[in-house]
Amino acid sequence: MPPRITTFADEAIIALDNIADRAVHFMQPTLRLGVTGLSRSGKTVFISSLVHNLLNGGRLPLFEALQSGRITATRLEEQPDDAVPRFQYEDHIRSLVRDRVWPDSTRAISELRLTIDYESASGWSRFFSPGRLSIDIVDYPGEWLLDLPLLAQDFRTFSDNTTALARTGIRAELSSEWLAAAAAIDMDAPADEMTAREIARVFADYLKACKRDERSLSTLPPGRFLMPGDLDGSPALTFAPLPDMPSGPPPAGSLRAMMARRFEAYKSVVVKPFFREHFARLDRQIVLVDALQAINRGNEAVEDLERALVDVLSCFRPGTNNFLTSLLQRRIDRVLVVATKADHLHHESHDRLQAITRRLVDRAVRSIGLSGAGIEVMALASVRATREATVREGGEDLPVIVGTPMDGETIGGERFDGNRKTAVFPGDLPEDPEAFFASLEKATGSRPMPELNIVRFRPPELEQTGEGIKLSVPHIRLDRAMQFLLGDRLA
């Protein structure tokens, strides 16, 4: 089983929070949906598209409550948590629809309440009351979720785990400055603030190098080193793991003791409040991953994505909620893991992308000894930026995708200006996910087969109706995701 990340005292506080939460929402059914994702997976785009399609009657044939006509009204309402920033839906959808640019990535937690009025499919339920469900969408960075396993670690364990990972593969090159700086200091010498600042800086630079597009690595705790916010420069973010520490407790007043103390402060000041105030209150969760980018970057990126999924899934509290358990210890009863940007592939490879992601999730679930019940996997595109076509080349029909590459994208030596459309053959994923993982295990370089041609496209240009109203944002399988996450609560 995954290590326990809460104490009994934590659980007691969480139970009291849950009782208070349920009391507030007793007369108004509410579902708290957590939305997170690993680097550049499209959390903001997913939420914006989901809300836009519900508010504007989008094409959602597999979302039963809407398709059957039982949803009578959908509206945005004031969010319940005054201390949490509002998810700026209007700004993000304006960027997508009017400006045709992708909105900025998630940098902090935010929240949005969407309320749906519906007619229950059960005549008995309709007799007692009209159906109404408020969905509190909680958007938070995936880096914050990857911090939760730190709650089960002490400073030595954190240092040993981080160092061992940093000495493998491409990370060995990226971490060289940090490891060299750490080896040059006397960690048992008296604590010195300037030394602590420098070692924290080079460690943060290592994490940032891992995250860059050309590497696309996923396992990067502590997450706030990548997005410090108002904690920038604070002691809670001025520490780093120390490799090869001597045995025994650190001398009082030493640099090693300072680092251990600040690591504990990071957990107390940053990680625990997020867990208690937000994560422990979730009912359902969607985790978006850019599996396509990892596949394109090579075997190390794929292995790192699997490692991140192990850490992510070990944090969840899977299980079925009933009235009593929801009062005392709320469970996340459904988790959806989504491989995003399916529109970057021809539809023939969509099921293959889903199968590879499913295989990653199954391996992660087995490695932590949990059941996969309540965990679903799918491939989708929150906003479809391409269409499919066929071109004739060499006497054969070649399936391609057509879209507008972003300004600066280069294809075959040709640079695009963000206005001209083009057709791209994206490549094919293998039909058998087992063959794909076998190729990973045999790969000696950093890039396994298959070769993919991944291009960044601008959001689509939406047509207008006769009244000048823009149509809803196009997507791939967003309705399937809605049905899994919300369908039973609108029955």
Image (cartoon, grey):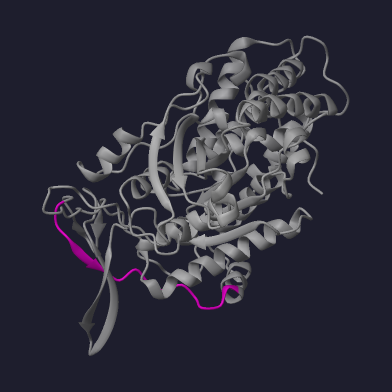
**Residue 167 seen in the current view:** no
Q: Examine the structure image and report whether residue 431 is included in the region drawn in magenta.
A: yes
**Residue 215 seen in the current view:** yes
Give the residue at the far front of this rendering: 127
Answer with left or right where residue 108 lies relative to residue 370. left
Give the residue at the far right of this rendering: 248
In percent of width and height, residue 258 lies at 72, 15
In percent of width and height, residue 467 lies at 12, 49
- Between 7 and 218, the residue placed more toward the observer is 7
Answer with left or right where residue 435 lies relative to residue 316. left
Which quarter of the figure has residue 17?
A: top right
Q: Residue placed at 74% from the left, 34% from the top?
A: 327
Q: Residue placed at 51% from the left, 39% from the top?
A: 135
Q: Is residue 173 above or below residue 371?
A: above
Q: Which residues are magenta?
A: 419-433
Q: Examine the structure image and report whether residue 316 is included in the region drawn in magenta.
A: no
* Prevailing secondary structure of the magenta residues: loop
